[in-house]
Structure formats: C-alpha cells, structure tokens
Image (tube, rainbow, N blue to C red):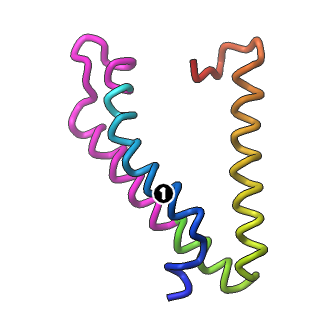
Amino acid sequence: MAVAAANPSISFTDAYQLFAVAFATVMFGHVYYPETGALPTSADTAIKIASSVGTVIGQIAFGLLSDLLGRKRVLCFSNKLTVDVWCRIEYHDSSNFQSFSIR
C-alpha cells in the first residue's frame, strides 16, 4: 500500500501525461508523417504503451525510494527534479541552437 500512495503529486502528473499522450501522438503524426497526417498504428501503439509502462515503473521506483528514504525527502527530490528538467528545457529552447526546440 505504501508504494501506491507514495507521492500524490506524481499521481496527478501521471494522469495528465496519460491523457496528453493521445494528443501528442496526433501532433507527431502531423509533424513526422505529413503525407498521411497520422502515425503508423505500430508507432502510435508503442508510444502509448511506453507511456503506461513508464508510469508504472516510475510509481514503483518512487514508492520504493519513499519507503527507504522517507516520503518527505523523496517528494522534495521529485519536485526538484521536475523543476530542474523544465528549467533545462526552457534554457535550451531560448538558446540560439536549433538542435533542440519545442516551438
């Protein structure tokens, strides 16, 4: 039970991610397959399955870490990790390099 209720903030972002991945695959289809406007079925399914598997693995990993290190410590770490990743994405997106852009 401790694994399932380890981090309520992660559960919110996981649910959002699982719903948003369906919209993301539609956009990927328009960008990477402009002739058909849709991802091949195998790629669409693989992305959706990878998202679900990553969610399960992440919840188990953060739950076990919470059991070992304490919930407060892991919650602070996961929040710091989330902010750090978003700051890095924004930093790289605002640079002059064209190798990484989310626009």
Image coords of residue 83 (percent x, y): 74, 47
Magenta stretch, overall SS = helix
The amino acid marked with disc number 1 is Asp
> In terms of image quadrants, where is residue 15?
bottom left
> Where does the image place residue 19, in percent across and percent down from the top left?
37, 47
What residue span does the magenta drawing correspond to? 28-57
Q: Is residue 40 above or below residue 82?
A: above
Magenta segment includes 97: no
Helix, strand or loop under label 1:
helix
Crowding near the residue tagged with mark 1, few <14, some 14–19, many ≥20 C-alpha atoms within 10 Å: some
Vertical comparison of 20 with 75: above or below: above
Rendered residue at 76%/37% (across/down): 87
Quick check: 97 left or right of 3?
Answer: right
Instruction: Give how far across and how far down residue 97 sits, in percent.
Output: 73, 14
Where's residue 46, x and y in %?
32, 46
| Quadrant of the image containing the C terminus | top right
